[in-house]
Image: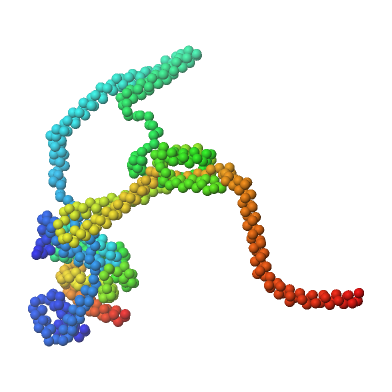
Amino acid sequence: MDRSLQHVFDAEEVMAYLDGELEPQRAAMLASHLEHCAECQSVARELRTVSGRMLNFEIEPMPARVTAVVVAELRAPKKPEPARALGFRQRVWAKWHELATNRKVWGFAAAFAVVAMAIAIGSLPTLFRAHEANQRVSELSAPAPQRQTRTGASYKSWVHKDEAELQQSQQALMSENMVSTAAAQPAAEPAPPPAPPQSGDTLQSAESVGPMIVQTASLSIVAKNYDEASEAIGKLARARGGYVEKLDAKAQTGSARELSIALRVPAKQLDGFLEDLRQLGHVEQESQSNEEVSAEYVDLQARLRSAQATERRLIELLATRTGRLVDVLDVERELARVRGEIESMQGQSNLLQHRVSYATVQVELSEVYHERLQLGVSTGTKLRNAFVEGVHNLEDGVVGALVFVLDEGPAILFWLAVLGLPVWLIWRRRRARADAKG
Amino acid sequence: MNTDEQLVLAFQGGSREAFEELFERYREPVYRFFRRRLDHPGRAEELAQECFLALLQNVARYEPRASFRSYLYGIAMNLVFAERRKAGREISENEKLDEREDRGSGQATDAGILVREALGQLQHDEREILMLREYEQLSYDEIGALLRVPVNTVRSRLVRARLAMKEQLVAIKDGD
């Protein structure tokens, strides 16, 4: 290579020639030179090889997402507003003119004026009464200098009389005002009935009200009356707008009945419902826990909104796109994916809302145990069972003995013979000797 | 067929189709530009998108003094530089090669990996010029404008880069 650098054409020029970057004159000279210069040919070959090999660094096609986003951005309406060209005063004037020439606006204005006048006329007597009462109050409380001139009991009684009058007049004033406001707005403040809230409004409130808390409670109750209590639990839950999620009853012979029941009640009704449950029997164990899920919910909502925005853009894109089929297919595929995500997130969001608006209550109900301990096994049954067991035992014993004799008998006889025979012989000889002496 | 510059002017005149045509021409090259220079496929995708959105927002101010290609790759190059500054290191460091292979592009062949490794061994300024020439097919003038170096410098660095690349390809192959 160093040699070629000192050549009449260096490698740089050969390269520029191959790249089409050499001035035409010089290029023509190099072209004719290349025909017979092996050295320059070899440089050219090497350079071409490098370029060729570099093309092996391939890249996969661009994901369709990018296309979708860019084209959607392009399609997004971004026309400059004509109002912006006008000055502020002109815009205000144009708006005002538009309003002034609109019949509807005049109609609304007239209706508003009539209503306002009606309210004003209706409330005049109330205002007057209120004004009078205020005057009376101020008159009664004001003349302190006069009072100082009185003495002893008369002063005291006067003061008391004054105070009593003051109280009376204030009460009168209050009741008057209340009556008048109640008359003016009959439906404004109805006494709030403690009706159980519907599931719909609890869901809404969960969405709008600040912190989102998942409430869970569990209770173990020993029922005074098991049957009544087990029936009552479901009813109590329904009365408070809740429902039974899972029920598991156990009634094994010889043991107390048990009921494990998972309930969902509107979160606002939880305290009341727990109070109801406590009436069913003796509470052995109770626990309550709160889990804050606001962050999770907010995050989910943000992601959902973003995915929905993408979906809208893609739909716009599909509606306006008239390009290649491949692109349309890409966008549709992307749309399907985004929709899947949205559905999944909506599902999660609904679930979360439901968990927040409906508290979970786990109740373990059991009955008082001792009364049923002996039930089901009578004395007759016990005697019969004992007899059957005795027969079985006898049978087992006899069979066992027989098995033992048959199993071990021959061996025992053999060893008796082997060990017993010499003993018996010795014993006989001694006896014979004793007999001979005797 | 309209030139890029004509399409830009048409888009400035309000033709969306002109921009779509430009996008059609450059979406794959721009994606490849980022994909070859960045570790992470997802990041390359994001930057390609960012690049086109930036183009969309700023193309109204484009004046046909420089070629559209050098304008577009100028935006892309700025994005890559910003990304590298953010990452705090260069993309083709030796110690990152293995890692990159793991993440690798979906179509990384042995030959492709070899080229990537060889590129990683080059000096930074040489590598950039070489890639702009071989992959983005920019002219010497365009490269010079983009990297703000004289054309002669582009030429001398490019030949050094190509010869070094040849050496590296041989060396890496022998190393295997």
Q: Nearer the viewer, residue B91 or A386?
A: A386
Coloration of the structure image: rainbow
Rendered-image quadrant of the N terminus of chain B: bottom left
Rendered-image quadrant of the C terminus of chain B: bottom left
Number of residue marks: 0
Most distant residue in the top direction = A154
Q: Nearer the viewer, residue A427 or A327?
A: A427
Q: Position of residue B110 (x, y in %)?
A: 28, 75
Residue A319 as seen in the image, left or right of residue B170: left
Specify the quadrant of the image occupied by residue A61.
Answer: bottom left
Residue A28's place in the image compared with A118, above or below, is: below
Residue A334's place in the image compared with B153, above or below, is: above
Residue at screen point 21% across, 26% down? A114
Residue at screen point 89% across, 77% down? A436
Residue B130 as seen in the image, left or right of residue A183: left
Specify the quadrant of the image occupied by residue A63.
Answer: bottom left
Residue A92's place in the image compared with A352, above or below, is: above
Q: Position of residue B75 (x, y in %)?
A: 20, 62
Specify the quadrant of the image occupied by residue A36.
Answer: bottom left
Residue A244's place in the image compared with B135, above or below, is: above
Q: Nearer the viewer, residue A281 or A267?
A: A281
Q: Could one spot residue A119 in this view of the protein?
A: yes
Residue at screen point 30% across, 52% down? A343
Residue A114 as seen in the image, left or right of residue A402: left
Q: Position of residue B151 (x, y in %)?
A: 16, 72
